Image: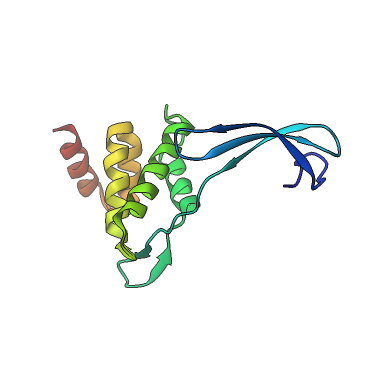
Amino acid sequence: MQCPYCKHTASNVIDTNHDAKGGIRRRRVCNGCSERFSTYERAILATPMIVKKSGTRDEFDRDKLLRGLRIACAKRPVAASAIDNIVDEVEAKLQGMGKSEVSSRIVGDMVLERLKALDQVAYIRYAIVYLKLGDLSSIQTEINELLS
């Protein structure tokens, strides 16, 4: 483990805690500069390949999903932890399916379901891109369904 302050490669663990998401938080002290820092560990479980509408296959990318959600939730009263929770839930659900491939539609629908409950404006922003709502009437239709 490399110290984020001095880049020294040796450190000692001074505290270990398990978090609710199944990960491990370790508090460390650098042997070089004596600064303290935390690291988080989580198991890397197999996630299925994502099959896009075009038929191409990509690995599930947590960071890509996180970026998309952050854009949809920009300037909204949505906590960063809530966005992280959506990504965690979607990833866990995909891993729990036990399939080698999953349609991108399933992933998008899972995200929309969670965004709808979290923030309706973020939901519409995400839906515009994901559902390819290309004109005002299709956006209005989606808003009307949300309001009903």
Where is residue 115 shown, x and y percent of the image? Answer: 32, 38
Where is residue 89 shown, x and y percent of the image? Answer: 37, 43
Among all residues in the image, which is located at the extreme left?
148
Q: Quadrant of residue 126?
A: top left
Among all residues in the image, which is located at the extreme top?
77
Left/right of residue 45 with respect to residue 17 in the rendered view: left
Where is residue 77 shown, x and y percent of the image? Answer: 42, 26
Q: Is residue 132 visible?
A: no
Residue at screen point 36% across, 54% down: 95
Q: Is residue 36 above or below residue 32?
A: above
Q: Nearer the viewer, residue 89 or 20?
A: 20
Among all residues in the image, which is located at the extreme right?
32
Here the colouring is rainbow
Left/right of residue 28 with respect to residue 17 in the rendered view: right
Residue at screen point 50% across, 33% down: 19
Where is residue 107 shown, x and y percent of the image? Answer: 32, 53
